[in-house]
Image (cartoon, grey):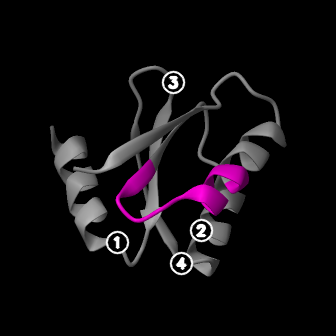
Amino acid sequence: MAIEILLDAHEMQPPAPMELALDALQKLQAGEYIKMIHRMQPFPLYNILYDNGFTYKAVPGKVSAFDIYIWKASDKITGLAIEEIISG
């Protein structure tokens, strides 16, 4: 089972959400994923993720506009767990 790290950035102003995400990415381990609650899609963050071996999935959120799931691209098991979470 994957471990969720929750980042609630939906009321933060830039650059705080980006800083929060980058800090969490440095600590992310295999078997863990970040669920970022955000009011918009952080497109600059997406490029950073891909450039550094992470992937993401953005879906309509329950608390704010988007729930963004982030995990290491090499962590296939966590990716499968996120797909199950998203599909409900």
Q: Secondary structure at mark 1?
A: loop
Q: Residues within 10 Å of mark 4 (few under 14, many from 20)?
A: few
Mark 3, Cα crowd under 10 Å, few <14 / some 14-19 / many 20+, is some
Residue 51, percent from left and from top: 63, 79
Q: Secondary structure at mark 4?
A: loop
Mark 1 vs mark 3, foreground winner is: 1
Going by the numbered disc 3, the residue's amino acid type is Ser
Q: Are marks 1 and 3 in contact (CB under 8 Å)?
A: no
Q: Amino acid at mark 1?
A: Asp
Q: Single out the mark in the foreground, 3 or 2.
A: 2
Identity, as a three-letter code, of the amino acid under mark 4: Gly
SS for callout 2? helix
- Amino acid type at mark 2: Leu
Question: In the drawing, what numbered circle is on residue 7?
Answer: none
State the extent of the magenta-drawn residues as a range: 22-33
To which residue does mark 3 refer? Answer: 64
Which mark identifies residue 49? 2
